[in-house]
Image: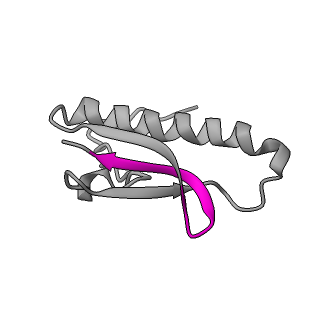
Amino acid sequence: MFAIETDVPVPARARSGRYPFDSLQPGQSFFVPLADGIPAAQRDDEMRKLARRVSSSCMADKRKNKDRSYRTAAASKDGAIGYRVWRTA
């Protein structure tokens, strides 16, 4: 059986975002690299998944902060491929 309890506080939500949207100012950007060790045959599919994940995160942040705007694009940095996110407003 389960005991029913009253006045047990709900824990605060301690979730930190995956990407640094709160620290990003207009004109700044960050790079999200594709994971290392992905075979060439799977790279295109993994890039599409990464693009979806990054774009979805941008849209979720924009829903919470209507004054923010982002632009994403495939990019490379130090030989790694991935996506770059720019805050445009």
Pick the front one: 46 or 15: 46
User: Residue drawn 27% across and 34% down?
Assistant: 62
Residue 43 percent coordinates (x, y): 74, 45
Residue occupying the point 18% across, 31% down: 66
- Position of the N terminus, as image quadrant, is top right
Tell which of 12 and 38 is nearer to you: 38
In the image, taking residue 40 as reference, residue 59 lies left or right, namely left
Front-most of residues 59 and 87: 87
Q: For this view, does 37 lie left or right of residue 46?
A: right
Quarter of the image for residue 9 reads top left
Task: Where is residue 30? Give x, y as percent.
Answer: 39, 58
Return the residue nearer the eye: 58 or 3.
58
Asked whether residue 10 is in view, the answer is yes
* Magenta-tinted stretch: 76-87
**Figure quadrant of the C terminus:** top left
Asked if one can make out residue 11 in the rendered structure from this viewpoint, the answer is no
Residue 76 higher or lower than 66, as above or below: below
